[in-house]
Amino acid sequence: MSDNIVTSFTPDYTPASHGHSVEQLSRPSLSYWQDAWIRLKQNTRAIISLYIVVSLALFTLAGPLLWQVDPALQDLNQISQAPSLPKRALLVDPYERWQPIILDDFPSEPETYVDVELMPAPSGVQPLGEPTTQQIRLRWEPVVGAGGYSIYRNQHAPEGINDLGLPLATTLGGNEISYEDRLNLEQRDYYYSIVPTDGFDEANVYTTIKVLPTIAITRDEATQRGLIDADTDIQIGDPLSLRFHPFGTDYLGRDMLARLMQGARVSLFIGICAPFLFVMFGILYGGFAGYFGGQLDSLLMRFADFVVALPFLLFMILFKIAFGIGPGESGVLPMLIALVVLGWPGTARLVRGQVLQIRNNGYIDAARLLGAKDSYLIVRHILPNTMGVILVTLTFAVPGAIFTEAFLSFIGMGVAPPTPSWGSMCNEGVKTMLSHPHELIFPATFISITVLAFNLLGDGLTEALDSRMRSR
């Protein structure tokens, strides 16, 4: 009796017939750089930093083509102006010497002097004519018994006799009842105080008047600056539109936006050119030491340790002396050489470590067995596998070089005026940061944003180029 064995298959295990199509799921093959780009795009901070770096490049290269303002052009009518909307100026005649008002029927030296503590404050203080940035003229009524008057100017309303501001002049007679101010006038509120004196001591009373001058410009100045043509039909007293300074002006009336663009060229040139040169040298030096190894590697790396111990500022000073660059002269070339000569050991160490790790891999030994030469191994296998470390090192070296340039220019050892750089602009802005903070804030902000962007981009590249994090 034979047993019949019946084999049954459940539907879950039924073999697929040849007529059915089997769907195969597979991930497309990605290269190392494609996979790194995908990981980089997932890092929001790194992508924003990349956009900032690209924007800085456009600001540096394309900005001067769009904003065609001479960064060395001085607008004396708008000195240390904060960012503001476009301004208008009043067309005036050239300045003419002014004769002060002296009363003939009032004694210059009174017969009977009044006690200085009993003198009244001057009355009738008023401006003469239209106050402009060319001149402000004041007059007042004489004080009986006064032997003269002291004139003060402040930028805020005085809070007492000891807060009158800048002493401008003291008249030598009680009959001289006017004064003309032409000292660094800007379009802002001024508070003039008139104090009577007995010829020696000042009284404890004063009269203050607030004056807001109008920006004034002569026809010749307007023609020289290209605001009007020589044959333009415009009359004295008509308004003119001045040049627009969206970032304001510095202490010499130069456009801050134009100077920031030109300064970016200097700062980024040093910040990119110097790291590129010393990173390339570090790659060759560290790759040579790591590939051949042995006593040569030990000797080369001991020399790198020696270079690390050299003081940067000392060599910067020595290079400036060697190139014959004196105080107040631009030291761009010595700074560039000092950065290249002393900045390569860090890159050399990183590349050496990578090469020591790569040269012992199996595919390197296999290539040697197949007859590959050293030059082929370096170009085809070793250098491509160190590109991730090289790019990260370069992105971290750029902000360091930019900050070094800014620091040296700030202390007067780098880029010297009138050549602008962000560091030298900060050095100039520190002098007026309390009264005109925009002269310091804008270049310092550009330095901070640039350094932060390159650092965040370097962090993103470190994660994106790490082969251990590659998608499987």
Image (spheres, rainbow, N blue to C red):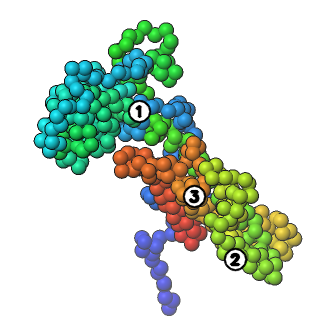
Q: How far apart are the two marked residues, 3 and 1, measured between alpha carbons? A: 29 Å
The amino acid beneath tag 1 is Gln
The mark nearer the N terminus, 3 or 2, is: 2
Against 89, residue 3 (above or below) is: below
Q: Which residue is mark 1?
A: 78
User: In front: mark 2 or mark 1?
Assistant: 1
Q: Nearer the viewer, residue 291 or 15?
A: 291
Which residue is pictured at 53% across the width and 50% down the height?
Answer: 424
Visible residue check, residue 325: yes
Q: Earlier in the sequence, mark 2 or mark 1?
A: 1
Q: Which mark is residue 408?
A: 3
Quarter-of-image position of residue 360 = bottom right
Residue at position x 69%, y 57% in the image? 320
Point 74% across, 79% down: residue: 302
Residue 305, label in figure? 2
Q: Position of residue 409 (x, y in %)?
A: 56, 54
Give the structural element (helix, strand or loop) at label 3: helix
